[in-house]
Protein backbone atom coordinates (compact mmCIF):
# COMPACT_ATOMS: atom_id res chain seq x y z
CA UNK A 1 0.00 0.00 0.00
CA UNK A 2 1.47 3.35 -1.12
CA UNK A 3 0.99 6.57 0.83
CA UNK A 4 -0.53 9.55 -0.99
CA UNK A 5 -0.06 13.12 0.26
CA UNK A 6 -1.14 16.63 -0.62
CA UNK A 7 1.31 18.97 1.09
CA UNK A 8 -0.54 22.14 0.10
CA UNK A 9 0.73 25.41 -1.35
CA UNK A 10 4.25 25.97 -0.06
CA UNK A 11 7.25 28.12 -0.90
CA UNK A 12 9.74 26.75 -3.40
CA UNK A 13 12.34 26.13 -0.70
CA UNK A 14 9.91 24.17 1.49
CA UNK A 15 8.91 22.00 -1.46
CA UNK A 16 12.51 21.37 -2.50
CA UNK A 17 13.51 20.63 1.09
CA UNK A 18 10.75 18.03 1.25
CA UNK A 19 12.01 16.50 -1.99
CA UNK A 20 15.47 16.06 -0.48
CA UNK A 21 14.16 14.84 2.86
CA UNK A 22 11.77 12.29 1.42
CA UNK A 23 14.36 10.94 -1.01
CA UNK A 24 16.87 10.50 1.82
CA UNK A 25 14.33 8.84 4.12
CA UNK A 26 13.27 6.51 1.32
CA UNK A 27 16.89 5.47 0.81
CA UNK A 28 17.08 4.77 4.57
CA UNK A 29 13.85 2.75 4.48
CA UNK A 30 12.06 5.10 6.90
CA UNK A 31 8.99 6.01 4.84
CA UNK A 32 6.63 4.03 2.61
CA UNK A 33 6.55 4.48 -1.18
CA UNK A 34 4.73 7.76 -1.69
CA UNK A 35 2.77 9.73 -4.26
CA UNK A 36 2.92 13.42 -3.36
CA UNK A 37 0.85 16.26 -4.80
CA UNK A 38 2.13 19.79 -4.23
CA UNK A 39 1.68 23.42 -5.26
CA UNK A 40 3.82 26.56 -5.07
CA UNK A 41 3.05 29.91 -3.45
CA UNK A 42 4.23 32.51 -4.33
CA UNK A 43 4.94 31.88 -8.00
CA UNK A 44 8.52 30.99 -8.78
CA UNK A 45 11.10 29.89 -11.31
CA UNK A 46 13.08 26.75 -10.53
CA UNK A 47 16.23 25.92 -12.47
CA UNK A 48 17.39 22.35 -12.95
CA UNK A 49 20.11 20.91 -10.72
CA UNK A 50 22.84 21.29 -13.40
CA UNK A 51 21.88 24.78 -14.59
CA UNK A 52 23.50 28.15 -13.90
CA UNK A 53 20.81 30.55 -12.67
CA UNK A 54 22.32 33.56 -14.48
CA UNK A 55 21.98 31.76 -17.81
CA UNK A 56 18.33 30.80 -17.31
CA UNK A 57 16.46 33.56 -15.40
CA UNK A 58 15.61 37.18 -16.23
CA UNK A 59 16.30 38.68 -12.80
CA UNK A 60 15.10 42.19 -13.67
CA UNK A 61 11.66 40.84 -14.50
CA UNK A 62 11.36 38.26 -11.69
CA UNK A 63 12.46 40.74 -9.02
CA UNK A 64 10.09 43.42 -10.29
CA UNK A 65 7.17 40.98 -10.41
CA UNK A 66 7.86 39.25 -7.09
CA UNK A 67 8.63 35.90 -8.71
CA UNK A 68 10.97 33.89 -6.51
CA UNK A 69 13.94 31.91 -7.87
CA UNK A 70 15.08 28.51 -6.64
CA UNK A 71 16.81 25.29 -7.66
CA UNK A 72 15.45 21.74 -7.90
CA UNK A 73 17.26 18.57 -6.85
CA UNK A 74 16.33 17.07 -10.23
CA UNK A 75 17.95 17.77 -13.59
CA UNK A 76 16.31 19.26 -16.65
CA UNK A 77 15.45 22.80 -17.67
CA UNK A 78 14.18 25.91 -15.88
CA UNK A 79 10.45 25.88 -15.12
CA UNK A 80 8.01 28.65 -14.25
CA UNK A 81 5.41 27.76 -11.59
CA UNK A 82 2.30 29.78 -10.89
CA UNK A 83 -0.02 29.08 -7.97
CA UNK A 84 -2.48 27.00 -10.03
CA UNK A 85 -0.08 24.36 -11.27
CA UNK A 86 -0.22 20.95 -9.64
CA UNK A 87 3.01 19.10 -9.03
CA UNK A 88 3.11 15.33 -8.66
CA UNK A 89 5.94 13.16 -7.38
CA UNK A 90 6.66 9.50 -6.87
CA UNK A 91 9.18 8.68 -4.14
CA UNK A 92 10.03 4.99 -4.03
CA UNK A 93 12.80 2.47 -4.73
CA UNK A 94 13.50 0.62 -7.94
CA UNK A 95 12.38 -2.59 -6.19
CA UNK A 96 8.91 -1.15 -5.64
CA UNK A 97 8.37 -0.95 -9.41
CA UNK A 98 10.26 -4.00 -10.63
CA UNK A 99 13.82 -2.66 -10.92
CA UNK A 100 13.18 -0.79 -14.18
CA UNK A 101 15.81 1.19 -16.09
CA UNK A 102 15.62 5.00 -16.08
CA UNK A 103 14.00 4.99 -19.53
CA UNK A 104 11.45 2.30 -18.58
CA UNK A 105 10.62 4.06 -15.33
CA UNK A 106 10.07 7.33 -17.20
CA UNK A 107 7.78 5.68 -19.74
CA UNK A 108 5.71 3.80 -17.15
CA UNK A 109 5.19 6.73 -14.79
CA UNK A 110 4.42 9.23 -17.56
CA UNK A 111 2.01 6.79 -19.18
CA UNK A 112 0.26 6.39 -15.83
CA UNK A 113 -0.15 10.14 -15.38
CA UNK A 114 -1.34 10.45 -18.99
CA UNK A 115 -3.98 7.79 -18.32
CA UNK A 116 -5.08 9.83 -15.33
CA UNK A 117 -5.50 12.95 -17.46
CA UNK A 118 -7.49 10.89 -19.94
CA UNK A 119 -9.98 10.24 -17.15
CA UNK A 120 -10.61 13.98 -17.05
CA UNK A 121 -11.39 14.00 -20.78
CA UNK A 122 -7.92 15.14 -21.88
CA UNK A 123 -6.28 13.21 -24.74
CA UNK A 124 -2.90 12.99 -23.04
CA UNK A 125 -0.08 10.70 -24.17
CA UNK A 126 3.54 10.06 -23.19
CA UNK A 127 6.03 11.72 -25.55
CA UNK A 128 9.66 10.60 -25.29
CA UNK A 129 11.97 11.66 -23.81
CA UNK A 130 10.08 12.81 -20.74
CA UNK A 131 6.98 14.85 -21.63
CA UNK A 132 3.24 14.29 -21.50
CA UNK A 133 1.47 15.91 -24.44
CA UNK A 134 -1.97 16.65 -25.80
CA UNK A 135 -2.12 16.64 -29.61
CA UNK A 136 1.55 17.54 -29.77
CA UNK A 137 1.38 20.25 -27.09
CA UNK A 138 3.23 19.75 -23.79
CA UNK A 139 0.99 19.67 -20.72
CA UNK A 140 3.44 18.13 -18.25
CA UNK A 141 7.23 18.10 -18.14
CA UNK A 142 8.90 15.50 -15.92
CA UNK A 143 12.24 14.44 -14.51
CA UNK A 144 13.84 12.51 -11.70
CA UNK A 145 16.82 11.81 -9.48
CA UNK A 146 18.21 8.59 -8.00
CA UNK A 147 19.89 8.09 -4.63
CA UNK A 148 21.13 4.50 -4.54
CA UNK A 149 18.02 2.38 -5.12
CA UNK A 150 15.71 5.21 -4.08
CA UNK A 151 14.37 7.67 -6.61
CA UNK A 152 12.15 10.73 -6.85
CA UNK A 153 10.32 11.21 -10.12
CA UNK A 154 8.28 14.38 -10.57
CA UNK A 155 6.24 16.41 -12.99
CA UNK A 156 3.75 19.26 -13.21
CA UNK A 157 0.29 19.60 -14.65
CA UNK A 158 -0.39 22.97 -16.28
CA UNK A 159 -3.84 23.99 -15.06
CA UNK A 160 -4.28 27.64 -16.18
CA UNK A 161 -1.13 29.05 -17.72
CA UNK A 162 0.22 32.53 -18.56
CA UNK A 163 2.72 31.85 -21.35
CA UNK A 164 3.85 35.49 -21.63
CA UNK A 165 4.71 35.61 -17.92
CA UNK A 166 6.69 32.38 -18.26
CA UNK A 167 8.63 33.64 -21.28
CA UNK A 168 9.51 36.92 -19.57
CA UNK A 169 10.74 35.07 -16.47
CA UNK A 170 13.15 32.82 -18.34
CA UNK A 171 16.16 33.59 -20.53
CA UNK A 172 14.30 33.09 -23.78
CA UNK A 173 15.76 34.82 -26.87
CA UNK A 174 14.34 38.34 -27.15
CA UNK A 175 12.60 37.69 -30.46
CA UNK A 176 10.34 35.18 -28.70
CA UNK A 177 8.92 37.96 -26.50
CA UNK A 178 7.06 39.50 -29.45
CA UNK A 179 3.35 38.78 -29.90
CA UNK A 180 4.27 36.34 -32.66
CA UNK A 181 6.78 34.61 -30.41
CA UNK A 182 4.27 34.37 -27.56
CA UNK A 183 1.69 32.86 -29.92
CA UNK A 184 4.30 30.37 -31.12
CA UNK A 185 5.01 29.34 -27.53
CA UNK A 186 1.29 29.00 -26.80
CA UNK A 187 1.05 26.61 -29.72
CA UNK A 188 3.67 24.35 -28.08
CA UNK A 189 2.10 23.97 -24.64
CA UNK A 190 -1.33 23.01 -23.37
CA UNK A 191 -3.18 23.49 -20.10
CA UNK A 192 -6.21 21.91 -18.51
CA UNK A 193 -8.51 24.95 -18.54
CA UNK A 194 -7.95 25.55 -22.26
CA UNK A 195 -8.69 21.90 -23.08
CA UNK A 196 -11.75 21.44 -20.88
CA UNK A 197 -13.08 24.99 -20.85
CA UNK A 198 -13.08 25.07 -17.05
CA UNK A 199 -10.80 24.39 -14.07
CA UNK A 200 -11.64 21.11 -12.35
CA UNK A 201 -11.24 20.94 -8.59
CA UNK A 202 -7.74 19.86 -7.60
CA UNK A 203 -9.17 16.86 -5.73
CA UNK A 204 -10.58 15.53 -9.02
CA UNK A 205 -7.15 15.89 -10.62
CA UNK A 206 -5.53 14.06 -7.69
CA UNK A 207 -8.00 11.20 -7.96
CA UNK A 208 -7.61 10.90 -11.73
CA UNK A 209 -3.81 10.78 -11.55
CA UNK A 210 -3.98 8.21 -8.73
CA UNK A 211 -6.25 5.98 -10.80
CA UNK A 212 -4.03 6.26 -13.88
CA UNK A 213 -0.90 5.34 -11.91
CA UNK A 214 -2.73 2.53 -10.15
CA UNK A 215 -3.69 1.05 -13.52
CA UNK A 216 -0.27 1.43 -15.14
CA UNK A 217 1.94 0.54 -12.16
CA UNK A 218 -0.37 -2.00 -10.48
CA UNK A 219 -0.22 -0.32 -7.07
CA UNK A 220 -2.76 0.78 -4.43
CA UNK A 221 -2.87 4.10 -2.58
CA UNK A 222 -4.03 5.24 0.85
CA UNK A 223 -4.18 8.89 1.90
CA UNK A 224 -1.75 9.80 4.67
CA UNK A 225 0.21 12.62 6.30
CA UNK A 226 3.82 13.70 6.60
CA UNK A 227 5.55 11.90 9.47
CA UNK A 228 6.86 13.70 12.54
CA UNK A 229 10.40 13.11 11.27
CA UNK A 230 9.61 14.62 7.87
CA UNK A 231 8.10 17.70 9.54
CA UNK A 232 11.04 18.04 11.94
CA UNK A 233 13.60 17.79 9.15
CA UNK A 234 11.63 20.30 7.08
CA UNK A 235 12.03 22.92 9.83
CA UNK A 236 15.74 22.10 10.10
CA UNK A 237 16.58 22.14 6.40
CA UNK A 238 14.21 24.53 4.60
CA UNK A 239 16.38 27.63 5.07
CA UNK A 240 19.30 25.98 3.27
CA UNK A 241 17.18 25.57 0.12
CA UNK A 242 16.48 29.31 -0.05
CA UNK A 243 20.15 30.22 0.52
CA UNK A 244 22.51 31.53 -2.16
CA UNK A 245 24.78 28.59 -1.34
CA UNK A 246 22.14 26.22 -2.75
CA UNK A 247 20.53 28.35 -5.43
CA UNK A 248 23.76 29.65 -7.01
CA UNK A 249 26.08 26.70 -6.43
CA UNK A 250 26.33 25.84 -10.13
CA UNK A 251 29.14 27.84 -11.72
CA UNK A 252 28.42 30.53 -14.24
CA UNK A 253 30.81 30.17 -17.16
CA UNK A 254 33.46 32.90 -17.38
CA UNK A 255 33.28 35.17 -20.41
CA UNK A 256 36.92 36.09 -20.97
CA UNK A 257 38.63 35.80 -24.35
CA UNK A 258 40.04 32.36 -23.60
CA UNK A 259 36.59 30.83 -23.30
CA UNK A 260 34.91 28.89 -26.10
CA UNK A 261 31.21 28.14 -26.05
CA UNK A 262 28.99 25.54 -27.67
CA UNK A 263 25.39 24.36 -27.41
CA UNK A 264 24.90 20.70 -28.31
CA UNK A 265 21.37 19.39 -28.84
CA UNK A 266 20.44 15.71 -29.03
CA UNK A 267 17.44 13.50 -28.19
CA UNK A 268 18.62 13.50 -24.56
CA UNK A 269 18.44 17.27 -24.18
CA UNK A 270 20.65 20.34 -24.48
CA UNK A 271 24.23 20.51 -23.19
CA UNK A 272 25.81 23.95 -22.82
CA UNK A 273 29.61 23.62 -22.84
CA UNK A 274 32.15 26.29 -21.94
CA UNK A 275 35.81 25.44 -22.44
CA UNK A 276 38.81 27.41 -21.21
CA UNK A 277 41.78 26.71 -23.47
CA UNK A 278 45.46 27.61 -23.25
CA UNK A 279 46.18 28.21 -26.92
CA UNK A 280 49.96 28.22 -26.50
CA UNK A 281 50.24 24.87 -24.76
CA UNK A 282 47.14 23.49 -26.54
CA UNK A 283 45.66 22.32 -23.26
CA UNK A 284 42.04 22.26 -22.11
CA UNK A 285 42.36 23.98 -18.74
CA UNK A 286 38.74 23.74 -17.66
CA UNK A 287 35.36 22.70 -18.99
CA UNK A 288 31.92 23.52 -17.60
CA UNK A 289 28.90 21.48 -18.67
CA UNK A 290 25.37 22.45 -17.76
CA UNK A 291 21.96 22.46 -19.39
CA UNK A 292 18.72 20.54 -19.73
CA UNK A 293 19.42 16.80 -19.35
CA UNK A 294 19.16 13.93 -16.87
CA UNK A 295 21.99 11.72 -15.60
CA UNK A 296 22.66 9.61 -12.56
CA UNK A 297 24.55 9.81 -10.35
CA UNK A 298 24.15 13.59 -10.28
CA UNK A 299 27.81 14.16 -9.48
CA UNK A 300 28.74 12.53 -12.80
CA UNK A 301 29.03 15.91 -14.55
CA UNK A 302 31.19 17.41 -11.81
CA UNK A 303 33.46 14.35 -11.88
CA UNK A 304 33.76 14.58 -15.68
CA UNK A 305 34.67 18.27 -15.48
CA UNK A 306 37.39 17.47 -12.94
CA UNK A 307 38.64 14.53 -15.02
CA UNK A 308 39.14 16.75 -18.08
CA UNK A 309 41.06 19.55 -16.36
CA UNK A 310 44.50 20.22 -17.87
CA UNK A 311 44.05 17.68 -20.65
CA UNK A 312 45.96 18.11 -23.93
CA UNK A 313 43.34 18.95 -26.54
CA UNK A 314 44.41 16.02 -28.70
CA UNK A 315 43.59 13.67 -25.79
CA UNK A 316 40.17 15.05 -24.87
CA UNK A 317 38.09 12.46 -26.71
CA UNK A 318 40.18 9.61 -25.32
CA UNK A 319 39.84 10.98 -21.78
CA UNK A 320 36.05 11.26 -22.08
CA UNK A 321 35.78 7.65 -23.22
CA UNK A 322 38.12 6.53 -20.41
CA UNK A 323 35.99 8.37 -17.87
CA UNK A 324 32.74 6.67 -18.87
CA UNK A 325 34.34 3.23 -19.26
CA UNK A 326 35.37 3.35 -15.59
CA UNK A 327 31.94 4.22 -14.15
CA UNK A 328 28.42 2.92 -13.81
CA UNK A 329 26.01 5.60 -14.95
CA UNK A 330 22.70 6.18 -16.68
CA UNK A 331 21.46 8.98 -18.87
CA UNK A 332 17.98 9.55 -20.23
CA UNK A 333 18.49 9.14 -24.00
CA UNK A 334 22.16 10.10 -23.59
CA UNK A 335 25.23 8.04 -24.43
CA UNK A 336 29.00 8.54 -24.44
CA UNK A 337 28.95 9.86 -28.01
CA UNK A 338 26.74 12.75 -26.92
CA UNK A 339 29.28 13.86 -24.31
CA UNK A 340 32.14 13.47 -26.79
CA UNK A 341 30.35 15.61 -29.36
CA UNK A 342 29.20 18.19 -26.79
CA UNK A 343 32.71 18.79 -25.43
CA UNK A 344 34.44 18.72 -28.80
CA UNK A 345 31.90 21.05 -30.39
CA UNK A 346 33.37 24.33 -29.04
CA UNK A 347 36.94 23.02 -29.43
CA UNK A 348 36.40 22.54 -33.17
CA UNK A 349 36.25 26.32 -33.46
CA UNK A 350 40.01 26.51 -32.89
CA UNK A 351 41.90 26.62 -36.15
CA UNK A 352 45.04 24.51 -36.42
CA UNK A 353 44.32 22.44 -33.29
CA UNK A 354 44.54 18.66 -33.48
CA UNK A 355 41.57 17.13 -31.64
CA UNK A 356 42.87 13.64 -32.20
CA UNK A 357 40.06 13.05 -34.70
CA UNK A 358 39.12 14.40 -38.07
CA UNK A 359 37.76 17.94 -37.75
CA UNK A 360 34.03 18.16 -38.56
CA UNK A 361 32.29 21.09 -40.13
Image: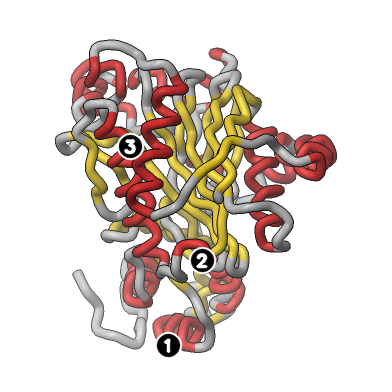
Q: Position of residue 88 (x, y in %)?
A: 48, 38
Answer with mark 3 or mark 1, whichever residue precedes in sequence: 3
Residue name at image x 52 percent, y 62 percent:
96
Disc 2 from disc 3: Cα separation: 22 Å
Quadrant housing residue 261: bottom left
> Could you tell whether 306 is left or right of 161 in the image?
right
Is residue 231 or residue 285 the one in the foreground? 231
Is residue 321 or residue 239 the one in the foreground? 239
In the displayed structure, would residue 192 be above or below residue 300?
A: above
Q: Position of residue 203 (x, y in %)?
A: 46, 22
Dot 3 alpha-carbon crowd within 10 angstroms: few under 14, some 14 to 19, many 20 or more: many
Quadrant housing residue 293: bottom left
Answer with mark 2 or mark 3, whichever residue precedes in sequence: 2
> Could you tell whether 358 is left or right of 17 in the image?
left
Residue name at image x 64 percent, y 36 percent:
224
Residue name at image x 39 percent, y 36 percent:
209
Can the viewer see residue 274 in this picture? yes
Residue name at image x 49 percent, y 51 percent:
153
Q: Nearer the viewer, mark 3 or mark 1?
A: 3
Can the viewer see residue 255 in this picture? no
Residue of label 1: 318
Quadrant housing residue 131: top left
Residue of label 3: 116
Dot 2 alpha-carbon crowd within 10 angstroms: few under 14, some 14 to 19, many 20 or more: some
> Could you tell whether 355 is left or right of 135 in the image?
right
Q: Are marks 2 and 3 in contact (CB under 8 Å)?
A: no
Disc 2 from disc 1: Cα separation: 33 Å
In the displayed structure, would residue 1 be above or below residue 224?
A: below
Q: Position of residue 160 (x, y in %)?
A: 36, 17
Dot 1 alpha-carbon crowd within 10 angstroms: few under 14, some 14 to 19, many 20 or more: some
Residue of label 2: 94
Q: Position of residue 316 (x, y in %)?
A: 44, 81
Amino acid sequence: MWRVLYTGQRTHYENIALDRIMLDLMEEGKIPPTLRFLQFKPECVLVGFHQAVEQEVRFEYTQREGIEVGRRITGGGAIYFDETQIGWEIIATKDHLGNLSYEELTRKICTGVAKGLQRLGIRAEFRPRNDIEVDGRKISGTGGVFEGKAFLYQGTILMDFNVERMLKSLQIPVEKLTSKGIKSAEDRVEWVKRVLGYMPEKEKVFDAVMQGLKEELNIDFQWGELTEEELRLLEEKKDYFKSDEWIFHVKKAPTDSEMLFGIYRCPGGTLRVSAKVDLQSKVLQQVIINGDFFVKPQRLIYDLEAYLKHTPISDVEKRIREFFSQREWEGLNLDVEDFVEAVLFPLRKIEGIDLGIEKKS
